[in-house]
Image (tube, helix red, strand yellow):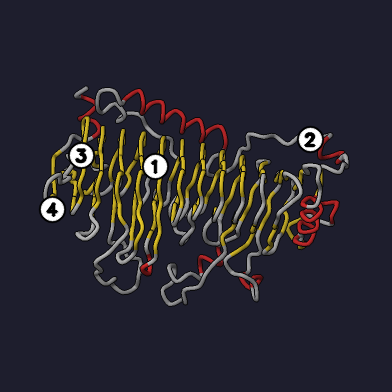
Amino acid sequence: MKSPELRCCCSFAGSCAVSVVVALSIVLVITSTHCVEGFESGLQLPRSGFLNGRVKSNRVLFIHDFGAAGDGVGNDTQALKDCWEVACSSPKRPRIVVPAGTYLVHPIVLSGPCKSKITFSIYGTIVAPQDPDAWRGLNRRRWLYFSKINHLSVDGGGTINGMGEQWWANSCKTNKTNPCRTAPTALTFHRCKDLKVTDLRVVDGQQMHMTMTNCVRVSLSQIAVMAPASSPNTDGIHISSSRGINVMNTTIGTGDDCISIVGHSSRINIKDIACGPGHGISIGSLGKSNSTASVKSVSVDGAFLSNTQNGLRIKTWQGGSGEASDINFQNVLMENVSNPIIINQFYCDSKIPCANQTKGVKVKNISFKHIEGTSATKEAMRFSCSEYTSCEGLYLEDVHLVLSSGEGFAESFCWEAYGTSGGSVFPPPCFSSDHKQLFVIKQEVPNEQQFIDSM
């Protein structure tokens, strides 16, 4: 991944130091934990002793001792299942060890409740079957599925590979003549509490890479999620109906949202993230098929987005209900990002146009502070809100977005968007504060080099 350049980071007084700190922190994450082509784990596996000697104990469980081959050919699913069952029934805080090697694992459910805390250490690579027929008669939405477990830790610096190429080729988004079918999420945590995942690489997911559903108190750090930009629906980290989630020091490059947050999630903290390629960081979509969904209390603090289709996005369907509220984006650098800041209450991901409806998900108390970089689209900011459920309490502070081309005009678009601004904001904000009207603000802004020369 291309490292962020700092040439455009001092666009207004007071923000330069913040931007440099953010950029440096992101660079440190990228260079110290992994790279796009190969993953350099921060945790080095010892060459002797712990694993080579394989000292057996009641607390350390090696899947080889349960019959795993680790050659990438033999089916190691039953070995992993048997190892899990022993660990889950142990009162001695066991550690499951997946040593160096390649472990072919078919769809599996690892469930609790368990008798004690479990650590799952992956030093090798766990791979999925390449052929979608391996899911015949099984739940096609799952591959590795952890359910109803408290105090689970996953670490080790290893890799989970979804082998998603055939799934992508069969997708209706890749080929419109294909039927639209579900595909597995590579790694799912469902109804887990006090979950910690650190130092892990998840690549080439069949569809979404990592999902938290109905989870409470989760810490994700030093995660690398990678898939081609052309891979359909391959969200990096997807958070649904969960609360108390912290995502830190993570790099994501996929074919869909780097991070997506949906229905009934709250207290989500995202810090020091590198995103791209992908569709940016998204709240939603919310309210599809007239459903109710709420996302509250979200903080994104420190991110570098490069060559993404969207930047910071909130998307809701017409006809839904609920709210997206108390959401703060700050200290974000962007490089050649399309739609850097966008709120869209008319989201429609359908083959046929969506009908206009008179209700929708409420969007309120949203702030964008210390956002800088280059926009690949003429519209750098778009606030497209419903006349029935207008966006309220919007706030911009110290935002500077110039065109990647260095030519022409940057634009802000507002419809039924109500809010205020502070500091220096480019392009100028177009919020309404007193009556409903349409604003399209255009201002010629200096390109990157002109801005540096003026400092």
Q: Quadrant of residue 229?
A: bottom left
Neighbour tally class for label 4: few under 14, some 14-19, many 20 plus, Cα within 10 Å: some
On screen, residue 415 versus residue 15, left or right, reads: left
Of the pair 392 and 206, the residue shown nearer to us: 392
Residue beneath label 4, please? 436
Neighbour tally class for label 2: few under 14, some 14-19, many 20 plus, Cα within 10 Å: few
Q: Is residue 215 above or below residue 75?
A: above
In the rendered structure, which amino acid carries the disc numbered 1?
Leu
Of the pair 347 and 274, the residue shown nearer to us: 347
Q: CA distance from mark 3 to mark 1?
A: 25 Å
Could you tell which of marks 2 and 3 lies nearer the N-terminus?
Answer: 2
Q: Is residue 66 above or below residue 252?
A: below
- Closer to the eye: label 4 or 2: 4
Residue beneath label 1, please? 305
Q: Quadrant of residue 40?
A: top right
Could you tell which of marks 1 and 2 lies nearer the N-terminus?
Answer: 2
Q: CA distance from mark 4 to mark 1?
A: 33 Å
Q: Are marks 1 and 2 in contact (CB under 8 Å)?
A: no
Q: Secondary structure at mark 1?
A: strand
